[in-house]
Amino acid sequence: MKCINSLCCGDCLQVMRQIPDKSVDLIFSDPPYFLQLKKTLVRPDATTVHTVHDDWDKFENFDAYDTFTKAWLVEAYRILKDNGCLWAIGSYHNIFRVGYHLQNQGFWILNDIIWRKTNPMPNFKGRRFTNAHETLIWCVKNPHSKYTFHYDSLKAFNEDLQMRSDWWIPVCHGHERVKDGKGKTLHPTQKPEALLYRILMATTNPGDVILDPFMGTGTACAVAKSLGRKWIGIEQDEIYFKFAKERVQNTKVFPDDTLSAMVRILPNKILFGDLVANGIIKAGQKLYSADRKYCAIVQADGSLKCGSDRGSIHQLAAKMKHSLSCNGWAFWYFNEKGKLKPIDILRECDKMKKTNKE
């Protein structure tokens, strides 16, 4: 397939129609929300909120939006492999309509995931609840699909607890937020890399083909590249496309020997997997016991590997101590300029404290 590991600037329907049948392992779809905004949103201090007023989010009415949704879902169903999966994200404006058409098209819903924003935009007028979440739908082509789901990896990421269907992740902010040439936010609904990191680690394998038909600034493709997946991105806006292309080109790939699956979020708590996802600890980095007797390699999914043994920071520490349990935060150390320091102090670094606070 010629479009593998490439980004396409154009209409998603036209490009999707050129993709062969059953050739994609995962589709991440962040379609227009059809927010139906009529007025400019203003903060109490009279500053304007950067919301979606772009043409790509405008439709004549719900019938037009439904026609568009059904059209791209027909193509999505066709090009998705029998054991592949589709993720769709949206707000209350559109996600229920998308879910309705997903089921009508034949998709089988496995879960709805609530992305709980730790730093949501407040409700300035005080006339509604603060909109602090978005909904993701995870589905497959039929009830018998043998889809990918890395349960053990998710538990390792979540420090030996089952991953729940509510994910606490901050809205995209800081250095990750793509800016235009004047320093202003480029895309109003850019998704955080941590969200895509979790999706791709949970439901794909290295080498799988990931399609994002509504690419925006390229988050899904950039994360796919970093995790050793193949990618196809489609974006009709030339400005978004330009920045997405540069972003993906500059994305570095994790070492191959850290990418196999074996991952894990608790409210207001920084996890070892969060340190890896935020680049505080890097995949391939070595961690040591205090006496340097044991050395483990950090994997991209947040697990550790020592020889043939692999597990979460707690599981592997317990195995090294021949104990039933062990606090991995106290057992493992990282090397900084020749000196060993406990990994627990990394949860207190400025970047992670800001994430936790928000």
Image (cartoon, grey):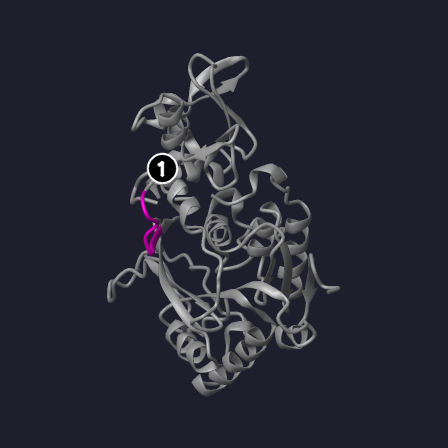
Outermost residue to the bottom: 63
**Over which residues does the magenta segment extend?**
161-167
Q: Residue at x 48, y 60 (%)?
A: 189
Q: Residue at x 41, y 42 (%)?
A: 157
> Would residue 279 be found to the left or right of residue 290 on screen?
right
Frontmost residue, 41 versus 201? 201
> Would residue 233 be found to the left or right of residue 130 on screen?
right
Residue 294 higher or lower than 307, as above or below: above
- Per the image, is 314 magenta? no
Q: Residue at x 50, y 45 (%)?
A: 261
Which element type, helix, strand or loop, lies under badge 1? loop
Residue 294 coordinates in the image, percent (x, y) = 47, 19
Can see residue 179?
no
- Per the image, is 164 magenta? yes
> Would residue 27 be found to the left or right of residue 42 on screen?
right
Residue 69 higher or lower than 278, as above or below: below
Residue 287 coordinates in the image, percent (x, y) = 49, 24
> Would residue 146 be found to the left or right of residue 14 on screen?
left
Numbered-mark total? 1
Residue 230 coordinates in the image, percent (x, y) = 64, 55
Q: Residues within 10 Å of mark 1 (few under 14, many from 20)?
A: some
Task: Name the magenta segment's main secondary structure.
Answer: loop
Outermost residue to the right: 2
Q: Amino acid at mark 1?
A: Ile
Q: Residue at x 61, y 52 (%)?
A: 229
Residue 136 coordinates in the image, percent (x, y) = 41, 63
Quarter of the image for the C terminus: give it.
top left
Q: Which residue is mark 1?
A: 270
Can see residue 99?
yes
Quarter of the image for the N terminus: give it.
bottom right
Residue 26 higher or lower than 227, as above or below: below
